Amino acid sequence: MPAPINFAEKRAGKIFRLYTGFKDLDAAMIYLFEVGNNYETYYRDAIFLNSRIQGAFEYFADIPVFRLPIHGARAKLMPILKLNHEIGICARDPN
């Protein structure tokens, strides 16, 4: 019988590859990924945003995750932009 699929580990692997791929391009930029009605970021970016603005912070498969509702995100991110941090929004292609 095959081993059961651990969906948390599978998602964590995808997140790690996607996030690290973008961070390899520009390590200083904060990347937010569109997931449902939220933006999510991970690892260092999640910890940094959690220390600066209000949002939902948790660990998923030992990965720090910060969520911010898309609606109203611009206003919440303004203090980060005023500190001269760049933010990259990674949206899903609707097609």
Image (cartoon, rainbow, N blue to C red):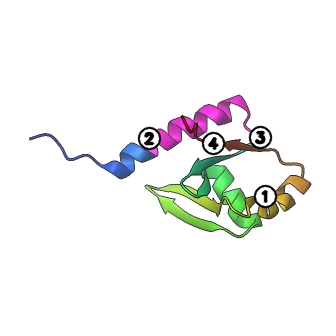
- Which residue is tagged 4? 91
- Which residue is tagged 1? 74
Q: Is residue 43 left or right of residue 1?
A: right
Q: CA distance from mark 2 to mark 3?
A: 22 Å
Do the residues bearing badges 4 and 2 touch, measured as CB atoms within 8 Å?
Answer: no
Upstream in the sequence, badge 2 or badge 1? 2
Question: Measured along the vertical axis of the image, is residue 15 above or below residue 58?
Answer: above
Q: CA distance from mark 2 to mark 1?
A: 29 Å
Upstream in the sequence, badge 4 or badge 3? 3
How far across and how far down the image is residue 74, in percent? 78, 58
Callout 2 amino acid? Gly
Q: CA distance from mark 1 to mark 4?
A: 15 Å
Upstream in the sequence, badge 4 or badge 2? 2
Q: Residues within 10 Å of mark 3 (few under 14, many from 20)?
A: few
Identify the mark at residue 28; answer none if there is no mark: 3
Provide the secondary structure element on which disc 2 rests.
helix
Image point 51% across, 43% down: which residue?
15
Q: How many marks?
A: 4
- Which residue is tagged 2? 13
Stretch in magenta? 12-27
How far across and how far down the image is residue 64, in percent? 56, 57
Callout 3 amino acid? Ala
